[in-house]
Amino acid sequence: MILKLAWRNIWRNKRRSLITAASVLFALFFALIMRSMQLGAYENMIRNVVGVSTGYIQVHAKDFWDEKTLEYSMERNPSLEQKILSTEGVADVVPRLESFSLASTGNATKAAAILGIDPQKETEYFDFDNGLQEGEIFAENGKGILLSEGLAEYFKLKTNDTLVLIGQGYHGVSANGKYHVNGVVKLRSPELNKRLAFLTLKEAQFLYGADNRITSFVVIPERENDFPELTESLRTGLDTAAYEVMNWREMMPELVQAIQADSAGGLVMLFILYLVISFGIFGTILMMTSERQYEYGILTAIGMKRGKLALTVVMETFFLSLLGVIGGGLLALPLVLYYHYNPINLGGGEMGDAYEEYGFEPIIPASIDPSIIFTHSTIVLFISVLLSFYAVWKIYYLQPVKAMRS
Amino acid sequence: MPVIETHNLERVYQDGSQVIKAVDGIDLQIDEGEFTAIVGPSGSGKTTLLNLIGGLDKPTGGQVSIAGENISDLSDNQMINFRLEHIGFVFQAYNLIPVLTAVENVEFIMLLQKKSKVERRRRATQLLEAVGLGDRLDKKPGELSGGQQQRVAVARALASKPDFVLADEPTANLDSASTANLLDIMARLNREENMTFVFATHDQRVIDRAKRIITVEDGKIKSDVKVDH
């Protein structure tokens, strides 16, 4: 009956309750949209980075990340690979060999980043084939080259055209080769999409004279969010004098800082939003408490314990906010889902250019991470319960005789 | 043993530099089955006396005993429990919970006593039938007349099986017919079930039905008369 009492009390002043619930609804709606967009943008940035670029975790030879030359490459050691694979939480490892070459065809020449990959694994873990624009992904022992869309456009190359790579390999050997274009892929990161070309790992090792050598093992975690703990486990298990284990946060600290700075701005906005609805909810509680002094006096007089009375009032506020929270969630959900599957395209605008400049796909998809709705609903409900403690305080210090005279 | 006993009861208020003795050394005994009216002009101290007897206010001197138990030293929580188990209240007006139906209002007090749902419903229905509201069980206070609301309040006051019922100006907002009807019900409950009623009132219609009239003036008992009807 306490629940019934709390629920029915909400509807004693229907208009006021609806206005309060509506203020919670709109605040939560805007909070969810804002945060989903913001976190969605970050997720997109991270996806761009951890996809073809770094992966969640990499194992390199010591100092490779600082020097980034083949001299700091490492032997593809089966025991190392096995050790990584046997670490709890590791789903797989993907070997890569990365270097630079001058790419040339006809009169055009451009510096290109060359990535030697295991095409099957890259396709499996990084949706590598999704961006295929023409041609095909090469087989494991394929001899051709896959060009990023930007590079293909620069050289005006199509499938089966020829590209020459000229560069320096392991220990300074000359690294030259002529390749048929196997296909063209569009990469999510605009920066990489302008300068990256792929060879099979074997072909890259051959080109750079780095037989059986790789520059990194990209570690695929079983659960992506567990990457910080997994980084530590790998560090504990591997010889850190010979190898370095880095996760994407460590490899891209500037991205982490940019996200943190931007996120802090968003949180300030949310704080202001919550402050505004807090005043709305508090106004309702204030009026409700002052209007019902007489009733509280009667209820205490007839034998209702203050704790039970306070619980009823807290539940009333909770239900009121819950109505707003459910409404806000239901209103925001379709919009969040829509923008998740149809991200806002910033291409062509100033903001889009800024995104591309930093190497990100110029889109803002909404995040559908359920923790966003859970967190913000909990915050709103917590605020309302916290504010209802004003009424609780009034009830605890209520003198029935005085209250009944009001 | 008296149901209510006060000994040298005092309630002093401080209003700035002025000391007001609302209740000034009252000794009183009310036995089971009495139908008593405490009367007096406004400001005489009758409501303060009723509040002290009901444990709604704390005396500044003397003591109140209910069924032999001194309630003056009970803590706030103990007092709430004591009121729930021993005292029924009927206030002047608006003393029902507006969002609950008549039967739920009566049940509410038994819910606080942790009585079972079946028992609550059975007794609440029985009491509402006894006050002539058997056909208004599911009506909310707003759908009942003032007299009907007061009858629900009487049913609620009796629901907890109290030792006595305190009624503070219960007829103040009622018309003559409703007042007569309410007093008939209370008198019948007093006669048939030996329920003790104590009224604080200046309504002559109530005074005319009381079997004992205690007149209070300036916080003191001026007269205490038993009446035979």
Image (cartoon, coloured by chain):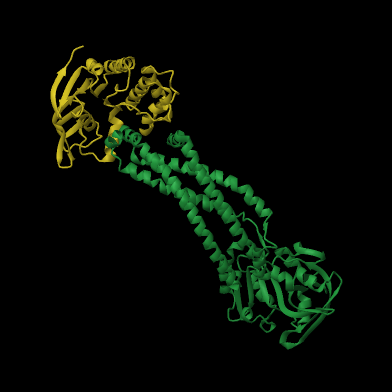
Chain colours: A green, B yellow
Q: Look at the picture and state if B193 lies above or below A248.
A: above
Residue A285 place in picture, x, y as percent: 41, 43
Residue A188 place in picture, x, y as percent: 70, 65
Residue A93 place in picture, x, y as percent: 68, 69
Residue B141's image quarter? top left
Look at the image and tell me in which quarter the C terminus of chain A lies. top left
Which of these two is toward me, A76 or A268? A268
Residue B96's image quarter? top left
Hey, which residue is sitting farthest top in the picture?
B229
Hey, which residue is sitting farthest bottom in the picture?
A172
Look at the image and tell me in which quarter the N terminus of chain A lies. top left
Q: At 85% from the left edge and 69% from the top edge, which residue is drawn?
A: A159
Q: Look at the picture and state if A250 lies above or below A373.
A: below
Q: At 82% from the left edge and 81% from the top edge, which residue is drawn?
A: A177
Hey, which residue is sitting farthest front in the picture?
A350
Tell whether A191 sits left or right of A401: right
Hey, which residue is sitting farthest right in the picture?
A160
Residue B145 place in picture, x, y as percent: 39, 21
Which of these two is toward me, A246 or A222? A246
Quick check: can you spot residue A91?
A: no
